[in-house]
Amino acid sequence: MAALPHNSYRKLPGAGAGGFNRYSLWLGADHLLSVGGSLIGERYRRFYFADVEAFVWRRTKALWLRVAFWLACVAGFAALGWFFDSPVRFVWFGLAALFVFAVVWDFLRGPSVACFVKTAVQFERLYSLNREPDLRKLLTQIRPHLTAAQAAAAQSAVG
Amino acid sequence: MPVGVPTVSATNFLCPKCRKALVPPTAPGPGASQCPRCSTIFEYEVLPALLAGPRVGIPGEALVDASEASCFFHAEKRAAIACESCGRFLCSLCDLELDGRHICPSCFSSGRKKGTLANLDQFRISWPGLALLSVLVLPLGFYPFTPIFAACALVFLGIAWRKPGSVTGRRRIFICLLATVLAVGELIGSAYLGRALIRNFTSGSAAP
């Protein structure tokens, strides 16, 4: 575990988007930095390692909703390709194949989740973490930092 | 596994779907549970801080001898450290550690006002983003003002050059380049169009 110098950050797994905003999570020297940004500016939330008490997550239906939409697109374009009897049909079949690729890609990225970080006074959603594999990767990366920062807390909990 | 006592801080252990307050886990580590209200199955990873209880501030030590240095803000407390910004003596209660530096409450509040403490930044304007917005989106609605928007974009890019970018250290180089190219292109295009219009107008008025 290499400690980062103050005011320098390393990008952590996961990226989310909602509306005009994009979300990401960064690893700082003694805290996690949640960044929510649009074209106009960036908002920051800091979660200090010593204060983080738990990560809580649940699976969501977002993946299935998205897959249903992709499949509807596949069906629509395939039907158009089937209906037209001209070289244009290959364009429709090509678009259908593109959406099949989207379905496969979505499945490969893993189940969708909603992840929350809990501190003594917060229970905040981390919008950048919306895939379970990303979440597991993140926990693996930050666990040493959290453990080191909370070593004293762990001793008092045992005692 | 060690068994901890749920503390006040554990009261906001909520269901990630319906936000019902739940009984917090009693041991650190990963686990899974089900909300009794909405039946949502969720997973968690509990850290020792949950079981350790709230952190308590260290009160300053009282002066034993009159010859001892005292805190600038609490004359009856012993000085433990000097502010790294202004040099005032501070007791343990007044010592604020931020970015690896020890500072006093007044330097903290002035640093927050002036924006000199990077770790307190909660929002930063993205000047390259604003520049791109000026040259890409605004002309779509108000095209006669395109040269003004392009000039504004160049000003924003100048500010972006001087001011620090994102807290994370990311530089939006691609957006800067794109905004610069578009702004310069729009200015040249506007000048060319303006010149053509003037020529057309003068040649039209000169004709009998």
Image (tube, coloured by chain):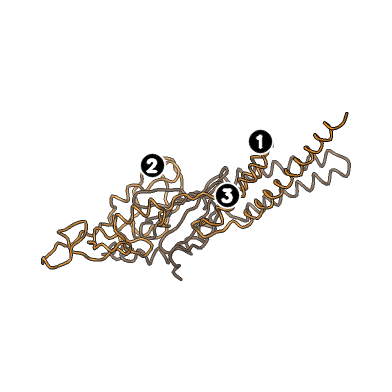
Q: Position of residue B81 (x, y in %)?
A: 25, 66
User: Can see residue B89?
Assistant: yes
- Residue occupying the far left of the picture: B65
Q: Which of the labelled discs sits on residue B20, or is there none? A: 2
Q: Secondary structure at mark 3?
A: helix
Circles 3, 2 touching at the beta carbon (< 8 Å)? no
At label 1, the amino acid type is: Phe
Which residue is at a point 14% across and 59% down the rendered structure image?
B76
* Viewer-closest of A17 and B197: B197
Circles 2, 1 touching at the beta carbon (< 8 Å)? no
Dot 3 or dot 2: first in sequence order is: 2
Q: Which of the labelled discs sits on residue B142, or is there none? A: 1
Which chain is displayed in brown in the rendered image? A
Task: Find the distance from the CA under tag 3 to the CA under tag 1.
Answer: 19 Å
Dot 3 or dot 1: first in sequence order is: 1
Q: From the viewer's perspective, is residue A44 above or below residue A150?
A: above
Badge 2: few (under 14), some or many (20 or more) residues near its Cα, within 10 Å? Answer: some
Instruction: Assign the C terminus of chain B to one quadrant of the image.
Output: top right
- On the same chain, marks 3 and 1? The answer is yes
Which chain is displayed in orange in the rendered image? B
Q: In the figure, is residue B188 to the left or right of B62?
A: right
Q: Position of residue B89 (x, y in %)?
A: 24, 63
Which residue is at a point 82% across and 31% down the rendered structure image?
B205
Q: In the figure, is residue A72 to the left or right of B90?
A: right
Which residue is at a point 15% across and 67% down the rendered structure image?
B68
